[in-house]
Image: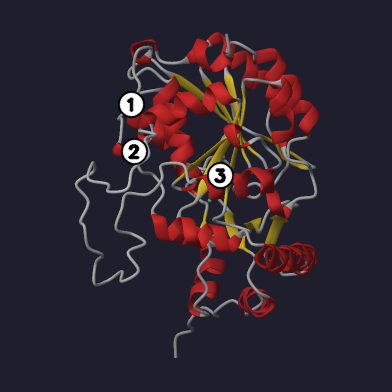
Amino acid sequence: VSTASTLLRSDLLDFHGYRSARSETVQGRIWLNANESAWPSAADPEGSCRRYPDPQPELLVGALARLYGMPPDEVLVGRGSDEGIDLLVRTFCMPGSGCVVIAPPVFGMYAVCARLQGARVVEVPLLDAPAGYAPDLDAMANAALLERASLLFLCSPGNPTGEVIAPEHIAALAARLRNRCLVVVDEAYGEFTEWPSASTLIADNDNLVVLRTLSKAHALAGARIGCVLAARETIELLRRCQAPYPVPRPCVDAALAALSPGALVATQAQVASVRASREEMLRELGSVPGVRRIYASQANFLLVRFDDPEGMLQKLLAAGIVVRDMRAMPGLGDAMRITLGDPMQNKAVLAALAQPDPIAEEAA
Ligand SMILES: *Cc1c(COP(=O)(O)O)cnc(C)c1O
């Protein structure tokens, strides 16, 4: 038995989800089984959107499988990796009694999806060491076992902290939690690091799940395409809980275009540019007065602590620059997350931060 079938919500053991018209694999010439219009929309003269889309478009699943080096039956396509997080929680956390383990400060959707499902969120904070943030994987595993959590979320590279978790540590964690807990590695920023993906460990660890997305490096956030990479049994269970037609046809076309050889070459060049400007910004920000600490990052952003975060935020806003205020996050009361932009945008950030402090108004 796979870890996923052991951890499936017991109330879903006999649940197979919605059977859409598209799930039937019959051959036909005249399709009158899904109450679709017989005519194309005036907005869509080619009629490419006239019919319900393929629930898991074969071409796109194949392209993503090749991109991530997985067999196609270990790939589930959905509406961004956000949908993957939601599906994992809904499939493996019993409402009211399920439990997930996270390591804050981290991407907010793990806790949001857990709350919506009525699942408990056990927090094992990241350790803020001189070398940067790092998860306490032993403590996370202990918490998962103690609390009988079905999901343990890791983010690598971490958002907003930027660190990568070494694959051997992920492998050891997954081995320790086999049959007990799914280890989910969110690699939304995986393209921006030279570290290998944890997906190569799935073949040996049936409780390992990796999330990937076209939203960040591939510049398709608006198309909402992401995927879950996991053992075939895990994918099958998630699919039962997914919407009948999760991926809109225009988004499939956009994703396929983004995965064409030419587009992938362009993406690689953009990723290389981000990596180069990341190291440059790391250096430049280091000499900006009022910058308290910059975390080394393997992603397309930098986490920066300031002596006077409010003042710096105002200087950026005065220049029309919006960054992510992290002050509400645990341990980040003086921090902002600055996405790396193009070279002009990065220069504008440095110039804004280097503006002199406004002089306190003197009485005339
Ligand atoms: C941006 C982000 C996502 C969301 O990705 P979508 O595919 O757009 O849903 C997931 N995880 C992390 C850590 C992110 O930063």
Q: Identify residue type, mark 1.
A: Gly
Q: Identify residue type, mark 3.
A: Val
Task: Give the residue pinned by disc 2.
Answer: 244
Which sits earlier in the primary sequence, circle 3 or circle 2?
3
Q: Considering depth in this image, is 348 or 258 the residue closer to the camera?
A: 258
Q: Residues within 10 Å of mark 2 (few under 14, many from 20)?
A: many
Q: Which mark is residue 311?
A: none
Task: Give the residue pinned by disc 1.
Answer: 17
Q: Residue at x 71, y 65 (%)?
A: 274
- Is residue 260 rendered to the left or right of residue 297? left
* Distance (Cα) linking label 1 and label 2: 8 Å
Q: Is residue 297 above or below residue 322?
A: above
Q: Quadrant of residue 293?
A: bottom right
Is ligand 1 less than 8 Å from the beta carbon at label 1?
A: no
Is ligand 1 less than 8 Å from the beta carbon at label 3?
A: no
Task: Give the residue pinned by disc 3.
Answer: 61
Label 2 near label 1: C-beta < 8 Å? yes
* Distance (Cα) linking label 1 and label 3: 20 Å
Asked which secondary structure carries label 2, the reply is loop
Q: Residue at x 50, y 69 (%)?
A: 322
* Distance (Cα) linking label 3 and label 2: 16 Å
Asked which secondary structure carries label 1, the reply is loop
Q: Residue at x 45, y 16 (%)?
A: 8
Evaluate whether residue 308 shows in this view. no
Q: Identify residue type, mark 2.
A: Pro
Q: Is residue 342 above or below residue 308?
A: below
Which sits earlier in the primary sequence, circle 1 or circle 2?
1
Which sits earlier in the primary sequence, circle 1 or circle 3?
1
Is ligand 1 less than 8 Å from the beta carbon at label 2?
A: no
Q: Residue at x 50, y 71 (%)?
A: 314
In percent of width and height, residue 14 lies at 35, 13
Q: Considering depth in this image, is 240 or 27 the residue closer to the camera?
A: 27
